[in-house]
Image: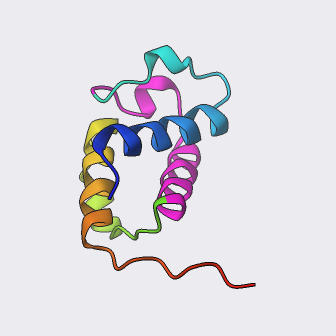
Amino acid sequence: MKSNDEVFDIVKKHLTTICGDVDPGKVTREVSMADLGATSLDIVEVVSCSMRELRVRVPRSELSKLKSIGGLVELLRQQAEVAPPAAPPQG
């Protein structure tokens, strides 16, 4: 199970990679991705990449309620707690 800090680091990594002009020092739990200049497409990509890395799914209805990066982190962490363990890679 991932901690809030670990999930935050994953979201921050994807946000700063996808939105190259975002200053990592300004990424906090209190701001929204839009506050940092992310477009709606950037946000979708950040969320998708974060969910893929954490191997979780979050209903769109839940995502639409989020107001900050901290809200996303908490939602992803909660989903990671209830998600079944991921199957080991095959090959």
55 magenta-colored: no
44 magenta-colored: yes
Q: Is residue 3 left or right of residue 37?
A: left
**Which quadrant of the structure image shows residue 81?**
bottom left
Quadrant of the snapshot with the N terminus? bottom left
**Front residue of this view, candidates 70 and 35:** 70
Q: Is residue 48 above or below residue 86?
A: above
Residue 30 position, x and y percent, is 27, 26
Q: Main secondary structure of the magenta part?
A: helix
Q: Who's the residue at 47% across and 68% down the image?
A: 55
Q: Is residue 47 above or below residue 36?
A: below
Q: Is residue 18 above or below residue 35?
A: below
Residue 54 position, x and y percent, is 46, 60
Q: Residue furthest right?
A: 91
Q: Is residue 53 above or below residue 8?
A: below
Residue range of the region highlighted in magenta in the rendering:
30-53
Tell me if residue 68 can be seen: no
Q: Who's the residue at 51% across and 82% down the image?
A: 87
Tell me if residue 79 can be seen: yes
Q: Who's the residue at 75% across and 84% down the image?
A: 91
* Number of numbered tags placed on the structure image: 0
Q: Who's the residue at 57% across and 79% down the image?
A: 88
Judging from the image, the colouring scheme is rainbow
**Which quadrant of the structure image shows residue 33?**
top left
Residue 24 position, x and y percent, is 53, 20
**Which quadrant of the structure image shows residue 18?**
top right
